[in-house]
Image (cartoon, rainbow, N blue to C red):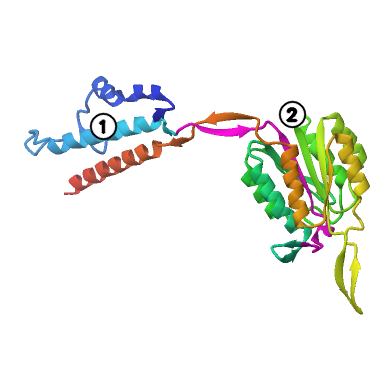
Amino acid sequence: MITFEWPWMLLLLPLPYLVRRMTSPVGNASEAALRVPFIDEFTDEAGKVPELRSGKWLSILAYIAWVLLVLAIMRPQWLGEFVEFPVSGRDLIVAVDLSGSMQEEDFLLRGQRVDRLTATKYVAGDFIDRRIGDRIGLILFGERAYLQAPLTLDRETVKTLLYESAIGLAGRATAIGDAIGLAVKRIRQRENANKVLILLTDGANSAGEVEPIEAARLAAREGLKIYTIGVGADEMVVDFFFGTRKINPSADLDEESLQNIADMTGGQYFRARDTQELNKIYTILDELEPVERDVRRFRPRKSLYYWLLSGALVIASFIMLSTIFRRVS
């Protein structure tokens, strides 16, 4: 259906008629202070009034243009059908480690070896897509922690910002405590009881001003539940000068601290050694933190004023060109 945002603007419709009735005509065209382009003096050399047909239809066109202009000012809108979307009322922040160790290529994705951040983007992007109704935020941390996306229902924007992140963007070290502290700061002012932080890292806290355990205590007091994920393979075969050897690329992962952080806040700690485990973890998180709680309805709106405004502009341009042509000829 079509509706008008400002229907009272319809009162402007008789304005040209009232102006014409209440003002006196100009006696001499040369003395006129204001000339209207589509109203001409219709007198011949003998002082007689000729046929006024052209003047009449120009006046009619001018009034049609005025009607279209008034209708455009009334802000016509097309209201679509009601659309329902689920709203969980949950505030969910995803914190992703961008430290230098995330460039370790110990994950397989579609048969190709990729670094940890690429695998994280692939799996976390699908997870974000499934969180319909949640307000999602994104924190990127390395040597410092940065809020890349505030809490929002716009999942596509959050996913795009995650995909655009790069290793080393926030520094080469790892500030886990600062990332938790930033998440607490963002949710502190919100009254929502469902506050969740998913923190993904592959190392130990090596930078920042806040210790992870102290930040976890603060998160527990604020009701922020933290799920921690440690990423990285336990074993990897690399080329060596004398052949190959096995190494542990996750030797720096502080699993004990991540476990303590999760326990203190009522969350859980997960270990992701490959892409399959990482994907399984996010599936488990979907089950632990269900999405839909209630449903809201809205009607999409589409503005239509520009069609009417364009029509008025076309008619006004035609009147102006017709008047100029008549005077030249």
Q: Which mark is residue 63?
A: 1
Please, what is the three-letter code of the amino acid marked with disc 1? Tyr
> At which x and y percent is residue 165?
72, 54
Q: Quadrant of residue 260?
A: top right
Tell me what residue is drawn at x 82 percent, y 30 percent: 223
- CB contact under 8 Å: marks 2 and 1: no
Q: Nearer the viewer, residue 303 or 106?
A: 106
Q: Amino acid at mark 2?
A: Arg
Based on the picture, tell me whether residue 239 belongs to the magenta stretch: no
The x, y position of residue 246, in whole percent, is 90, 68
Q: Specify the segment rendered in magenta.
A: 81-107
Q: Is any part of residue 180 visible from this angle?
A: yes
SS at circle 1 = helix
Residue 98, above or below 94: below
In terms of depth relative to the viewer, which is nearer, 306 or 237? Answer: 237
Q: Quadrant of the N terminus?
A: top left
In the picture, measured across the screen, residue 292 lies left or right of residue 104, that is: left
Task: Specify few, some or many for label 1: CA neighbours under 10 Å numbering under 14, 14-19, or 20 or more.
Answer: some
Q: Nearer the viewer, residue 9 or 285?
A: 285
Q: Is residue 210 visible?
A: no
In this view, the mark in front (2 or 1):
2
- How much space separates mark 2 and mark 1, taking CA atoms? 54 Å
Residue 278 vs residue 43: left or right? right
* Residue at the image position 69 percent from the left and 55 percent from the top: 122
Is 94 part of what is drawn in magenta? yes
* 299 horizontally vs 11: left or right: right
Q: Which mark is residue 324?
A: none
- Vertical comparison of 68 with 178: above or below: above
Name the residue that disc number 2 marks: 190
Q: Secondary structure at mark 2?
A: loop
- Picture coordinates of residue 59 (x, y %)? 21, 34
